[in-house]
Image (spheres, helix red, strand yellow):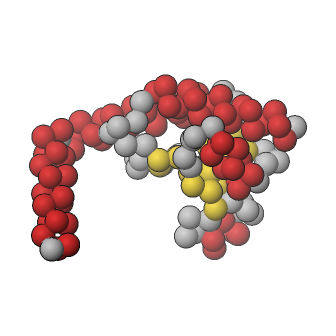
Amino acid sequence: SMKEQTLKITKIVADDLKEIGLDNIHRKESGILEYAISQFSEIPEIHILGNPKERGALLSITLEGIHAHDAAMILDEENIAVRSGHHCAEPVMKRFNIPATLRFSVGVYSEKWEIDRALIALKRVIRLFK
């Protein structure tokens, strides 16, 4: 049944998480995010939103003068998956006058070269809209 299959898959995922270790996953994700922040920070047109003491596996940015939906379409052409929009935070976005953001997600499977590719694509977006 579908329920049995779901339970089996859930157990496999839980076993994998235990084997890898949540601390190792957190360390890997944090390292990738720190790398992304350091690389993205070098581009003046990229604005990183928020600077929390502890960050989850997400990074939201805006691009100066470029709508997030336009950027997301070009990133998609480069096979870079991001989310664009309000991310269920429209009142906050209105409060800070932000029409939309690009949101990058990382996981234990993410690698630094993917951040490098995203940065190249973001530079392309910036060039296209300047």
Q: Is residue 83 left or right of residue 3?
A: right
Choose between 10 and 64: the one closer to the eye. Answer: 10
User: Is residue 40 something one can see in this rendering?
Assistant: no
Where the N terminus falls, by quadrant? bottom left
Provide residue 75's location: percent of width, then percent of height: 65, 42
Q: Is residue 59 left or right of residue 49?
A: left
Quadrant of residue 9 in the image? bottom left
Q: How many marks?
A: 0
Q: Is residue 49 left or right of residue 114?
A: right
**In percent of the image, x 66 and y 42: which residue is there?**
77
Residue furthest out toward the right: 130
Provide residue 38's location: percent of width, then percent of height: 55, 29
Q: Is residue 122 above or below residue 6?
A: above
**In percent of the image, x 18 and y 46: which residue is there?**
17
**In percent of the image, x 12 and y 49: which residue is there?**
15
Q: Is residue 95 left or right of residue 17?
A: right
**In percent of the image, x 73 and y 62: which residue is there?**
99
Quadrant of residue 117 in the image? top right
Residue furthest out toward the front: 1
Provide residue 112's location: percent of width, then percent of height: 46, 27
Where the C terminus falls, by quadrant? top right
Provide residue 45's location: percent of width, then percent of height: 75, 37
User: Is residue 11 something one can see in this rendering?
Assistant: yes
